[in-house]
Amino acid sequence: MSKDHSVQSQQISDEFSERTLVARETVYEGRIWNVLHDSVELSDEGVIIERDYIAHPGAVTVLVIDDDERVLMINQYRHPVGMRLWELPAGLLDVAGEPPLEAAKRELWEEADRTAQHWSILTDVFLSPGSSSEAVRIYLARGVALVPEDRRHTRTEEEAELITEWVPLDEAVAQVLAGKIHNPTAVIGLLAANAARAAGYATLRHADEPFTVHPGLRHQ
């Protein structure tokens, strides 16, 4: 039976909860991520649970906002849902030893042909913690500049069809609430940016803060 506890809002915080891993099996090995089967001791009473989940390398997302409070959004085809989605520049943490901030800068260059001078953290999220270990850091980038054509990344496959558009933040938030934008990190990033703007961006964390919720980066 669940118990209700009275906790002041500023005190709530997710926390790590170490459990004993009894056994682990890789049941599917994929090109980007694997599916694991874990047997875990849930409590001191010896209760064992078994869970299948995606072992994900993690990712970064970049919300770029300009002096006119417009957000740089990209549009690309996503095959699993069969739709072109409005998103934010993003990518996997799949380069060995690359810090999350450098990965974010690389993705902004690769997907949007841009660089940014000022970086901060909007938020860190798990996209589907019941079925995946995927942790995503969402950055806010300002002071953006267009990369010269001779220094741009050559996009291939779905990214070759990528479209970029500057969208007023208020309009993008309205589209989220209207159910017109579905990418989860875009939804979270836009709502977080709207909240951060209301606070004058004064509450954002430094871009170099360790990405402690990502399993592979907790000690960086």
Image (spheres, grey):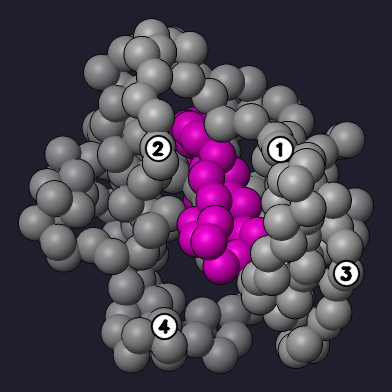
Any mark on residue 33, and which? none
Callout 2 amino acid = Ser
Between 81 and 200, the one lying in front of the other is: 81
Which of the two discs, 2 and 3, sits closer to the camera? 2
Say if mark 2 contacts mark 3, CB within 8 Å: no
Residue drawn at x 83%, y 62% is: 95
> In the visual, does 114 lie left or right of 15?
left
Say if mark 1 contacts mark 3, CB within 8 Å: no
User: Which residue was labeled with disc 4?
Assistant: 78
Label 1, label 3: how many angstroms apart (C-alpha)? 18 Å
Of the residues under marks 2 and 1, which one precedes in the sequence?
Answer: 2
Q: Position of residue 191 (x, y in %)?
A: 29, 39
User: Which residue was labeled with disc 1?
Assistant: 17
State which region is magenta: 121-148
Asked whether the viewer can see residue 59, the reply is no
Label 4, label 1: how many angstroms apart (C-alpha)? 34 Å
Say if mark 4 contacts mark 3, CB within 8 Å: no
Asked whether the viewer can see residue 69, the reply is yes
Which of the two discs, 4 and 1, sits closer to the camera? 1
Mark 3 nearby-residue class (10 Å; few <14, some 14–19, many ≥20): few
Q: Position of residue 194 (x, y in %)?
A: 27, 31
- Find numbered disc 1 in the image and state the secondary structure of the residue it sits on: loop
Of the residues under marks 1 and 3, which one precedes in the sequence?
Answer: 1
Task: Relative to 137, say whether 91 is above or below.
Answer: below
Callout 4 amino acid = Arg
